[in-house]
């Protein structure tokens, strides 16, 4: 019984640590958003359910995945798609309308695709996988292009890279996406590469 209780405590600790890391990541993302918005940036209570909460949830899912991988246990497949929580803002009726009519909100979908694509491209190879090299190269190339686009968009939206804000925004946005893509690899079982 004590072993079971210890395992649950370890899992809970990993989930909480992952959630804290995810919240920190999401707060940095919100800081990046403020950098690119400039003087027009405002922070409202919507930041909590649409930026901080999804980041915390995704981080907690990755914490669970890291815990399970570390014990040789399979990772639930839903963890791979946990970054979809970043698309939560476009589910709001007004936001969905804005997305269709103006394109506002497409950044959340873009980030989701880069994160999930990067995680897929960097994941351990699966046993019996057909054309793993080609599929991973294509998806990885698209994710890398997304990172470069994020780098350029951050600089373009925040101002010249020679200016302080532009110089901070350009690498921060790309680094946040790269870090999230690396974390997304936790959704795949490390043991897959050794099952052959």
Image (cartoon, rainbow, N blue to C red):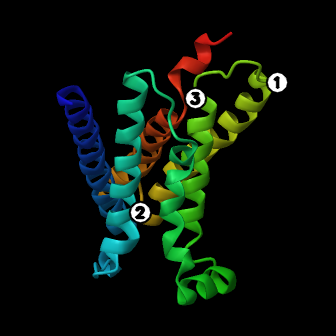
**Mark 2 / mark 3, whichever is N-terminal:** 3
Residue 141 located left or right of residue 115: right
Q: Please indicate, yes or no, whether residue 35 appears anywhere in the rendered image.
A: no
Nearer-the-camera pick, 54 or 43: 54
Instruction: Identify the element where label 2 is drawn.
Output: loop
Label 2, label 3: how far apart the Cα atoms are: 32 Å
**Mark 1 / mark 2, whichever is N-terminal:** 1
Residue at 68% from the left image edge and 9% from the top image edge: 196
Residue at 22% from the left image edge and 26% from the top image edge: 3
Residue at 40% from the left image edge and 72% from the top image edge: 50
Q: Which residue is mark 3?
A: 122
Give percent across and percent down for residue 68.
40, 31
Label 1, label 3: how far apart the Cα atoms are: 16 Å
Foreground label between 1 and 3: 1
Q: Locate the N terminus by quadrant.
A: top left
Q: Which residue is mark 2?
A: 159
**Mark 1 / mark 3, whichever is N-terminal:** 3
Q: Is residue 106 above or below residue 42?
A: above
Q: Which residue is mark 1?
A: 130
Residue at 26% from the left image edge and 52% from the top image edge: 24
Packing grade of label 1 (10 A; few <14, some 14-19, many >=20) is few
């Amino acid at each position: 019984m004590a072993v079971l209780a210890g395992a649950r405590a370890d899992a809970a600790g990993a989930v909480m640590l992952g959630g804290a890391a995810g919240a920190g990541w999401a707060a940095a993302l919100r800081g990046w958003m403020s950098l690119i918005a400039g003087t027009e940036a405002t922070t409202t209570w919507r930041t909590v359910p649409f930026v901080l909460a999804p980041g915390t949830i995704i981080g907690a899912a990755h914490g669970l995945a890291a815990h399970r991988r570390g014990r040789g246990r399979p990772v639930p497949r839903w963890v791979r798609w946990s970054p979809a929580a970043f698309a939560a803002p476009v589910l709001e009726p007004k936001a969905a309308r804005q997305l269709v009519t103006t394109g506002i909100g497409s950044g959340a979908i873009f980030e989701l695709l880069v994160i999930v694509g990067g995680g897929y491209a960097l994941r351990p190879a699966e046993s019996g996988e057909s054309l793993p090299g080609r599929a991973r190269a294509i998806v990885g190339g698209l994710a890398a292009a997304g990172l470069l686009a994020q780098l350029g968009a951050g600089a373009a939206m925040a101002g010249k890279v020679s200016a302080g804000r532009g110089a901070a925004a350009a690498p921060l946005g790309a680094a946040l996406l790269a870090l999230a893509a690396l974390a997304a690899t936790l959704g795949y079982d490390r043991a897959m590469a050794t099952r052959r």
